[in-house]
Amino acid sequence: MNSDEFVLAINPDPMQYSVRVERAKYDLVREAILDAMFDHGPMTFKQLGDLVEDHLRNNFDDSVKWYYTIVRQDMEVRGE
C-alpha cells in the first residue's frame, strides 16, 4: 500500500503517538460519525460510539470502537 492509502490520525495528547490508519476505514468511520451527529445532534462519547458501532457492525472487519476513538480524536484535533 502506498502512503496515499493511509491517513495520519493525530492524537490530541502530545505525549501519545499519532496513528496511520487505512484511508478507506478512516473514511467509513468518519462518515458514520458525521451521519450520527447530523441525525441525532449533541450526545455523549458513548452514545455516539454506540451509534457508529451499530451503523458499521456488518460492514467493518476490525474493532469499530478502536477506530471510532482514533478517528473522533483526529476529527476533534482538526476542528471537525
Image (cartoon, rainbow, N blue to C red):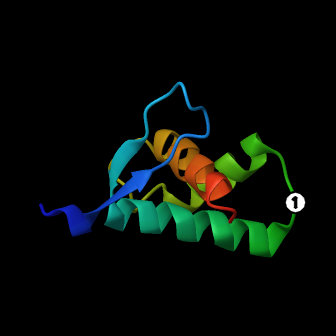
Spot occupied by residue 19 in the image (x, y as percentages of width and height): 38, 42
Q: Is residue 50 above or below residue 55?
A: above
Image position, residue 74 (x, y; %): 56, 52
Q: Position of residue 18 (x, y in %)?
A: 43, 40
Q: The C terminus is located in which quarter?
A: bottom right
The answer to whether 52 is drawn above or below residue 34 in the figure is above
In the image, 18 versus 55, the foreground residue is: 18
Q: Is residue 46 left or right of residue 42?
A: left
Where, quadrant-wise, is the N terminus in this rendering? bottom left
Please name the residue shown 67% across and 73% down the image: 35
Q: Is residue 34 left or right of residue 68?
A: right
Q: Position of residue 59 (x, y in %)?
A: 39, 62
Label 1: which residue? 42
Q: Quadrant of residue 3?
A: bottom left
Query: How crowded is the residue under tag 1: few (<14 C-alpha within 10 Å), some, or many (20+)?
Result: few
Q: Which residue sits at x=66%, y=70%?
A: 34
Residue closest to the far front:
14
Disc 1 element: loop
* Residue found at the very far top of the displayed protein: 15
Residue at the (55%, 71%) spot, across then down: 31
Total labels drawn: 1
Near-viewer residue (25 or 74): 74
Residue pictured at 44% horizontal, 68% vertical: 27
Looking at the image, the residue that sits furthest to the left is 1
Image side of residue 32 versus residue 19, left or right: right
Q: Amino acid at mark 1?
A: Pro
